Image (cartoon, coloured by chain):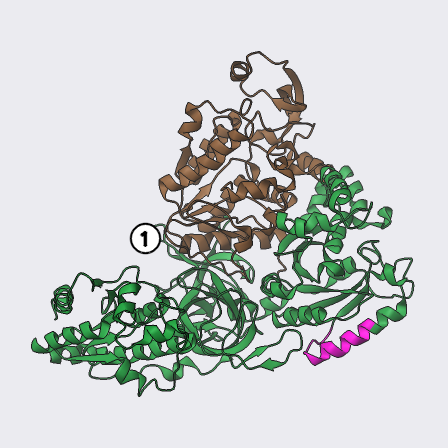
Chain colours: A green, B brown
Amino acid sequence: MADASRHPTYQADALIAEDIEAYLETHQNKQLLRFITCGSVDDGKSTLIGRLLYDSKMIFEDQLAALESDSKKVGTQGQEIDFALLVDGLAAEREQGITIDVAYRFFATEKRKFIVADCPGHEQYTRNMVTGASTADLAVILVDARKGVLVQTRRHSYIAHLLGIRHLVLAVNKMDLVDYDQGAFERIVADYRAFAAEIGIESFTAIPISGFKGDNITDAPSAQTPWYSGPSLIHHLETVELAGTAAQARSFRMPVQWVNRPNLDFRGFAGLITDGSVKPGDKVRVVPAGKTSTVASIVTFNGDLGEAVAGQSVTLTLADEIDCSRGDMIAAADDPPQVSDQFEVTIVWMSDEALKPGRGYWLKLGTQTVTASVAEPKYEICVNSFEHLAAKTLELNGIGVAELRTDKPIVFEAYGTSRQLGGFILIDKFTNATVGAGMIHFSLRRAENVHWQPTSITREDHAALKNQKPRVLWFTGLSGSGKSTIANEVEKRLNLMNRHTFLLDGDNVRHGLNRDLGFTEADRIENIRRIGEVARLMADAGLIVLTAFISPFRAERRLVREMMPEGEFIEIFVDTPLSVAEARDVKGLYKKAREGQLKNFTGIDSPYEEPEAAEIRVNTVEMTVEEAADHIIRQILPLK
Amino acid sequence: MHTLTHLERLEAESIHIMREVVAEAERPVMLYSVGKDSAVMLHLARKAFYPAPPPFPLLHVDTTWKFQAMYDLREKMARESGMELLVWHNEEAAERGINPFDHGSLHTDMWKTQGLKQALDHYGFDAAFGGARRDEEKSRAKERVFSFRSASHGWDPKNQRPELWNLYNARKAKGESIRVFPLSNWTELDIWQYIMAENIEIVPLYFAEERPTYEWEGGLFMADDIDRLEQVLGKRPQITMRPVRFRTLGCWPLTGAVASEAKTLADVVQETLLTSTSERQGRVIDKDAGGAGMEKKKQEGYF
């Protein structure tokens, strides 16, 4: 147990009792450091955090009493206090003795306040560690002195480094179990140094500790490690440089969160400043549009400010009436951030459902939300050996490098420059779950260079000449439901009505444009994406396009819908029960699928997601082909 | 160079969270319990949207057993902030006469948990701010800032959305909702320091004063409404005037008073720092169902 009289917080008690005002004065002005601890249960991570809380007096008497009784009941330290029980919060974790989720803990010393993200160490919780690391300034990597640098040590260090944590602490724990042997400590440090250089970690601080006994936690060197000349863990945490310092030195950036318009006389732009600082009178540029103006005032509840810096939430007013809304960024006029729609990124996959290359996901970066699709990964990174592995997709906890494109240009910085303007999340459009996180390396091209070439003949001109309103009639349904037959009948009628049409179906697409694609899920998504693009071009040319593809996934149908102007995409659900379609089995495909000769067959071993709100639905059990075609034509009138 | 203090960083983070909700949710509401955390949350909301008033109403899920001083401050703060105040009473609990003396944890369940669900459903709120902090309790320590709830208001701790950087995913299907905790990263001491620094008005019950108290099942309580107390208990308990204050505020028959001489904010902070029993100890709620009391309540829809 640490010597209480030497502990900084215990000394503080005297000041609290004597002069509370003076005490509070010093504490108003503490800085905040966020860090993570990584390691497995076996490395003594929870014990270390429990120790930090205990030594900084963040544990109250009633909690301590509960802890003592729990320690005897379910603890792993015999009759001694099991600090791990303090931090493993969820019932399932206490029962299984493991840490599943990231838990946040708080403690303070004389100099700083600390937020600790306690991260689970097992490989299956990589996503949890990534989450904890994303907001941390520092990482404490725990190593068991008896075991040295293990695969998991390498994994944790790699992830911390990947997420941009610049300060790493190698805490060689359980020194009490190796008799505080200096040689053991130095061997581990040498091993770690060799490995750290390999993955580009420039520096780290190594400290020999015992979380259980308290050595070198608050004071160093402990009586047991006279050979150690470095700082105690707490001392190091109190003095390491904070990330906010570097952010303030960069050019000004503030993503606009919300436009404040309480009345006609006030229009303010609310946001959190991510980089730099701002003063009234500063020239600013609103990106991506590029218009410039001058900051008129920095408005807050406590009065206007003369200056605001990175890390503050403020409201700015501008001297000119210019377009600016959520998703835009107000930035230094002479050094605006980049804008692009194609990137090389690192992606960490966080969902049980694997990444689907080509599928549209919501991408949220800063205050921007756009549709993004990820190409097949260039490679996946093995988090244990750092080898680059070939990959078609990324599974849960997979980390890979891929190209990503967005449906419109976004404002960004490389993640290495700014975490907040280079880090993004991916959201599944149907489940709304956060399925992935990513970090931008660089833009693959500058979006400015690919601005659309304005053409003289517009899509409206094309359509007017054909005397019709372009549309995409998207037939979806099971194999054998009657999509092609009905689409063909609809096209015949449109033709008789002097409309310009084109029917895209499996035969004219699979044999040409998409002949390089197979039937895996990724290929099926790409198939639909390309068909969508072609349909859009044809609609731009003024045609009424009919497509007849199973297109089983809602996400892909939605992706195509979002490519088109509002109201131009008409989803037609050819609703035929599986039993009926299978009984028809026009091409004998169901039989083959049932016999296992055809893999990934929709309805058999691959799902069909029915439309939730199709514009038109035809029931082929109740309607004949002619009736279905009539019904569809009636629904799409008028045609111009 | 202006190095931000921890309070400035916490304030900026909370304001950022509130603005994200207003930008992305359709119908947000702020749950207002009139306690010190609520007071800080409301103050932050006024700062976040200044000069506009916060663009959402305040909702108080009332049990009819709150301290009178809380009702008084509630009305005053709603007026001052220019916000609409909604008060919800679970009518079923009222009809069945559910009270903290006869019905124990059913009182909390009916008035608060069920009442909250009813109110959210009734008004169709899709995002609700709450003043919970991660340092309060072990299961809270693992809860997200944006805590996603099913259409039946359940919380699934094993299926929480990862929350990276300061990016919050506010997307949800119809009927689902999000509880948002802008004070997640604040500690009890931070709250007190901020109240002091910003001169935020809180219920006087936090400060020591001579108050009428009675003992009940081993705890010390304040007789906020002696007639009603007598009515429910069937007798008038022994009332003693004592200098007491409260570390948390809830229903007066469930909120233990502590003997104290702390009359000013500085005294209270001093006492808090030197004290050695944790904040929720005065509340009965956490001790149900072993160590997992709060986690279980939250799964059922408690805030």
Q: Is residue B247 above or below residue A464?
A: above
Q: Is residue A289 visible?
A: no
Q: Position of residue B117 (x, y in %)?
A: 43, 39
Q: Position of residue A369 (x, y in %)?
A: 42, 65
- To which chain does the residue with label 1 belong? A
Q: Is residue B302 above or below residue A140?
A: above
Q: Secondary structure at mark 1?
A: loop
Q: Is residue A459 visible?
A: yes
* Amino acid under disc 1: Leu
Report the magenta residues as a range: A188-203
Q: How many marks?
A: 1
User: Between A520 and A366, which is closer to the camera in this rendering?
Assistant: A520
Disc 1: which residue: A264
Q: Is residue B27 left or right of residue A574?
A: right
Q: Main secondary structure of the magenta part?
A: helix
Q: Is residue B299 above or below residue A299?
A: above
- The reply to whether the magenta stretch includes residue A6 is no
Residue at the location (74% across, 66% down)?
A169
Q: Position of residue B214 (x, y in %)?
A: 63, 18
Residue neighbourhood size for the residue with mark 1, other residues' Cα within 10 Å, grouped as few (<14), some (14–19), many (≥20): few
What is the residue that sits farthest to the top in this orientation? B235
User: Between A596 and A176, which is closer to the camera in this rendering?
Assistant: A596
Quarter of the image holding residue A356? Answer: bottom left
What is the residue that sits farthest to the bottom in this orientation? A512
Q: Is residue A215 above or below residue A460?
A: above
Residue at the location (69% across, 34% down)?
B267
Residue at the location (54% across, 14% down)?
B230
User: Between A495 and B142, which is closer to the camera in this rendering?
Assistant: A495
Q: Position of residue B207 (x, y in %)?
A: 63, 30
User: Between B115 and A406, which is closer to the camera in this rendering?
Assistant: B115
Q: Is residue B190 left or right of residue A512?
A: right
Quarter of the image holding residue A191? Answer: bottom right
